[in-house]
Amino acid sequence: MALPSTYTGSYSTLPEFFGKIRDAQAPDRFTNQILKDLGYKSNNHRPFIPLMKALGFLSADGGPTQRYQEYRNHALSERIMGEAIKEAYSDLFLIKAKPTSKDSELITGKFKSYHNVSDTVAKLMSKTFFSLLKIADLDYNPKQLSTEKVKDKIEPIKRETAEVKEKIIKETSGLGLHYNIQIHLPATKDIEVYNAIFKSLKEHLIE
């Protein structure tokens, strides 16, 4: 799905709504009754559920997904929403990398042509999208997070190799001794972790 057709006339309450689901315990299944229990009883609120499905927060049967669970982490919620929006509305980001209110006519026109809907419906689709943007971090880069994780794994090894190197220099000064050094690598399928480890070994121990 590159451009959801789901929209709501209560688009202005979406930030509040997602704030509530972030702060509440995730249900086994998100139903209209759960929606009412959260205080959203209008027919204009019912599209919230299919919208959550379009964003990958709910499975087809209404069950909370891993994305839903991760969104409940306050430190990650804006990043998760940014990721969800970029995925669900990917066609819009081909037009504008970081859409703003100044691009509303352009975005509305895309909804109108893509779904062949009226001006009124297209505007509601656009306003729904822009309302979600208010609670999203579009600058989040998953690759950057991966690099940070690699760095976290490398730093302890760099410290260890530096200590080993210093010890070798002290203990072998003027002697022809050879050391057999064993480095315990972390269990991971990410090849970048190993590349970074061997690069660190070359820089801090071998040379």
Image (spheres, rainbow, N blue to C red):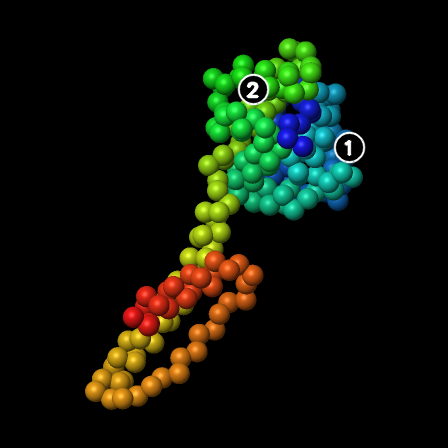
Residue situated in front as seen by the camera: 158 or 97: 97
Residue furthest left as drawn: 174
Q: Does 95 appear above or below 137?
A: above
Question: In which quadrant of the rendered image does the C terminus lie?
Answer: bottom left
Give the residue drawn at x 48%, y 40%: 140
**Residue at the location (56% across, 34% down)?**
86
Image location (x, y in percent) of residue 17: 63, 30
Under mark 2, the amino acid is Ile
Q: Position of residue 124 (x, y in %)?
A: 63, 17
Q: Which mark is residue 107?
A: 2
**Tags 1 and 2 in contact by the CB under 8 Å rule?**
no
Q: Please identify the quarter of the rendering in which residue 80 is found.
A: top right
Badge 1 crowding class, 10 Å Cα cut-off, few under 14, some 14 to 19, many 20 or more, is few
Q: Secondary structure at mark 2?
A: helix
Total labels: the figure holds 2
Residue 34's spot in the image, x, y percent?
74, 34
The residue drawn where x is 47% and y is 63% is 194
Say which residue appears at 64% left-offset and 17% top-offset: 113
Secondary structure type for disc 1: helix
Residue farthest toward the top in the current orientation of the protein? 119
Give percent across and percent down for residue 188.
54, 63
- Whole-number angstrom distance, CA of label 1 to CA of label 2: 33 Å
Q: What kind of residue is marked 1?
A: Gln
Q: Which residue is mark 1?
A: 33
Task: Specify few, some or many for label 2: CA neighbours under 10 Å numbering under 14, 14-19, or 20 or more.
Answer: many
Q: Is residue 54 something one can see in this rendering?
A: yes
Q: Is residue 135 left or right of residue 115?
A: left
Q: Is residue 162 visible?
A: no
